[in-house]
Amino acid sequence: MSEDQVESLTTAVLWAGFGVGALFGAIAQRTHFCTMGAVADIVAYGDWSRMRMWALAVGVAVIGFNTMAALGWLLPADSIYGGDRVIWLSNLLGGLLFGFGMVLASGCGSKTLVRIGGGSLKALTVFAVLGLAAYATMRGVVAVARVDVVDAVDLRLAAGQDLPSLLAHASGWLPSTAAWTAGLGAGGALVAWALARPEGRRAEVALGGALIGLTVVLAWWVSGVLGRVDEHPLTLERTYLASSTRGIESLSFVAPMAHLIDWLILFSDANRRLSLAAVSVLGVVAGSAAMAIATRSFRWEGFAGTEDTAKHLVGGVLMGIGGVTAMGCTVGQGLSGISTLSIGSLLALAGILAGARLGLRYQEWRVERMA
């Protein structure tokens, strides 16, 4: 493959990533897909509909990823979720901060982008604060404490931390057999649970969950299949074009916001190139805006007052710090990471859900105190 062909393929990968992001944004806008909203519905109303939608999305993503891995299309070890080092404290603590922050900010990273597309200036402010906090946690002042203190607490495994790798190591099975077994078993169980009750079989819930899960699978395919060059003409090594992590990746919305801000600020620097992650962020906003306009649900939204502003700013900071520390958000870890059946992703998700529950309890306490 020549350098010109690589450049052409990189452009195709970026456009495909934008398209997948736009599809995610349109579906999330139309179906109100939101992990925080799913938790809030259970706590406030005992309504499990959106949680079943989320579980269905995870189940489809798990089956899709592990099917491609079993077929040899994807190399799980080339993702950030597949290493043998489990930074369990970072996953848990980062998830806890992110979960609490997303309650204060009225939604997680993906919901923030969807709300921007729907006309929310509040969400646009959260995006800016979240992106800057994420950048500081990746490379700035917060990064020092993250790397030296929190990330230093880890657990080393004999194999990759994803369940198929651990299963293959323990049983002696072929990696493909382990991927089929774990993927179909875990993914099938999630799909079955999601569809077990009537609320999970409603058209909007079932279709929304399945389509969101498919966008995660599509993003894996774009990065790990379309964007894979086994022998780059310059390095002669396997390369994943436009990857921000230098490996295969799927949808995630915290670090990518920082990457997008970095590209916008340093656009004239020839060394700054658009990444698959950054264009997916733009795609989500575009897809959400298109759906909001098409369904006549686009509405400008501003802050209600000083307290509302402060709450969203703090939420944005917590999500930026927590999302990078946990190595992902409700989508980056809760969908993309979980689709690999990674231990670190399971821990991060547990932290996010616990943080969301604490955040909702805090909101209840604030309302009671004001009353």
Image: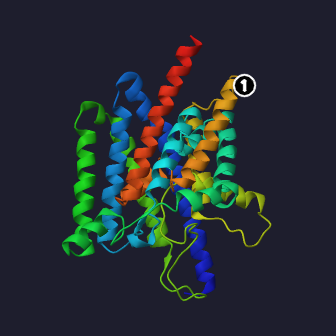
According to the picture, the residue beneath numbered tag 1 turns out to be 306
Q: Is residue 47 visible?
A: yes
Q: Write down the quadrant of residue 312 in the picture.
A: top right
Q: Position of residue 120 (x, y in %)?
A: 65, 34
Check disc 1 and give the amino acid type. Answer: Thr
Q: Residue at x 48, y 64 (%)?
A: 249
Q: Is residue 279 visible?
A: no
* Residue 41 versus residue 352 in the image, above or below: above
Which element carries disc 1, helix, strand or loop?
helix
Q: Residues within 10 Å of mark 1 (few under 14, many from 20)?
A: few
Q: Residue at x 59, y 14 (%)?
A: 370
Q: Position of residue 279 (x, y in %)?
A: 61, 58
> In the shown orientation, is residue 200 left or right of residue 316?
left
Q: Write down the quadrant of residue 266 in the picture.
A: bottom right
* Residue 129 versus residue 12 in the image, above or below: above
Q: Position of residue 60 (x, y in %)?
A: 33, 52
Q: Nearer the viewer, residue 221 or 65?
A: 65
Q: Quadrant of the C terminus?
A: top right
Q: Quadrant of the N terminus?
A: bottom right
Q: Residue at x 50, y 53 (%)?
A: 326
Q: Position of residue 263 (x, y in %)?
A: 71, 61
Residue at the extreme top of the image, as rendered? 371
Count of number-bearing discs: 1
Q: Nearer the viewer, residue 176 or 33?
A: 176
> In the shown orientation, is residue 236 left or right of residue 211?
right
Q: Residue at x 40, y 45 (%)?
A: 350
